[in-house]
Image (cartoon, rainbow, N blue to C red):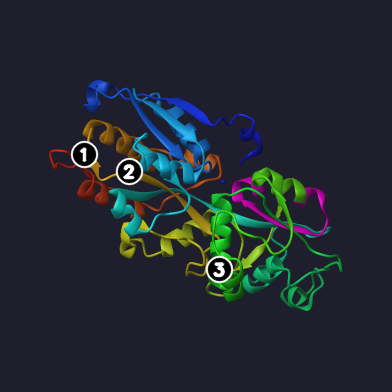
Amino acid sequence: MFRKHLIAKRVATATLVSGLSLATTGMAAVTEISGAGATFPYPVYAKWAGAYEKETGIRLNYQSIGSGGGIKQIKAKTVDFGASDAPLKVEALDESGLMQFPMVMGGVVPVVNLPGVGANKLHLSNDVLADIYLGKITHWNDKRIKAENKGLRLPGKAITVVHRADGSGTTWIFTNFLSKVSKEWQEKVGNDKSVAWPVGIGGKGNEGVASYVERVKGSIGYVEYAYALQNKMASVLLRNHQGHYVAPTSASFQAAAANADWANAPGFFMVLTDQPGKASWPITGASFILVYKQQGKPEVGKAVLSFFDWAYHQGGKMAESLDYVSMPAGVVRLVEKAWAQEIKGSDGKPVFEAH
């Protein structure tokens, strides 16, 4: 899930060097840990590792290859952890002996190109958004859109729907939301990283969608929050589960995560779309880490969890600087408690001790 100033620097495989005095960590045998998966969290992982360099001595090799690739690689045991924007259900985790936990959050944001309509001026309810993407609402002066936007001058221009042409975690989150709020969407299109779009034009990556929206007047698309913010795109106000129109902000993403019932989510399977709460942004998503419960090399498992432990507790400001959202403290406590209980070495002892 695509920042303009980072796109040129992104590579499929990045070696992130970092380091804590090996003598103090008790992990002198570990010189490198590896991971692969979602492209969405790559920039913040790189940022964290750059700062972590001053405190650790472990090399992190992360392959930014997409969620599906990350799941395949961790199941094949070719990496120490996987990363996915689409969480695995507990049955799939148990089948492979994996544990997952949420690491960082972001939001998917509808953006428009309507002359005279700035950011967070257009109000859209969830059913209206779904019907636009179903091709049932075709013009901006449709009576249903006008009813939500009294006083806002809307053109009689045709709506150009823009979507992703490639498979992505962004699309998975967006279509998951549409499937929850529209029975017709669920039945006709469904929820996946790539779907058969009823209408519209496709752009590759967030940058491709944004490029179309920026060029085509009367268009609507969906991109990551950070991309919309940094490129000054006109995001919309969405009606959430409680019926309140909310703007996409770090606070509204945090609200969606905080109101989610993580404590009763088996395997931390949690999709943050359409969550309750007056302030919750309805298309919020988390990126997840996958690790084996049984660690054949406990020192490597400890090194992996130590990196993410540091990121949870020390990486918040760095995440915010890249427009990511940190997990709420309560969720972090649940995750680290689960690490101590579930992730063990071949001797049956936990590889990580909760704070």
What x and y, as percent, mark residue 53?
A: 40, 24
Q: Residue at x 46, y 25 (%)?
A: 15
Describe residue 150's horizontal placement relative to residue 47 as left or right.
right
What x and y, as percent, mark residue 289?
A: 39, 45
Name the image quarter holding residue 12.
top right
Q: As shown in the figure, which amino acid type bears the numbered disc 1?
A: Val
Q: Nearer the viewer, residue 31 or 355?
A: 31
Question: Element under label 2?
Answer: strand
Q: Residues within 10 Å of mark 2 (few under 14, many from 20)?
A: many
The reply to whether the magenta stretch includes residue 53 is: no
Q: Nearer the viewer, residue 335 or 161?
A: 161
Q: Which residue is mark 2?
A: 291
Quadrant that contains the C terminus? top left
Q: Residue at x 57, y 75 (%)?
A: 183
Q: Which residue is mark 1?
A: 351
Q: Residue at x 65, y 69 (%)?
A: 130
Q: Residue at x 26, y 51 (%)?
A: 338
Q: Residues within 10 Å of mark 3 (few under 14, many from 20)?
A: some
Q: Which residue is mark 3?
A: 179
Mark 3 to mark 1 CA distance (whole Å): 39 Å
**Is the residue 233 above or below the residue 10 in the image?**
below
Residue interval drawn in magenta:
213-229
Mark 2 to mark 3 CA distance (whole Å): 29 Å
Q: Residues within 10 Å of mark 1 (few under 14, many from 20)?
A: many
What x and y, as percent, mark residue 98?
A: 31, 48
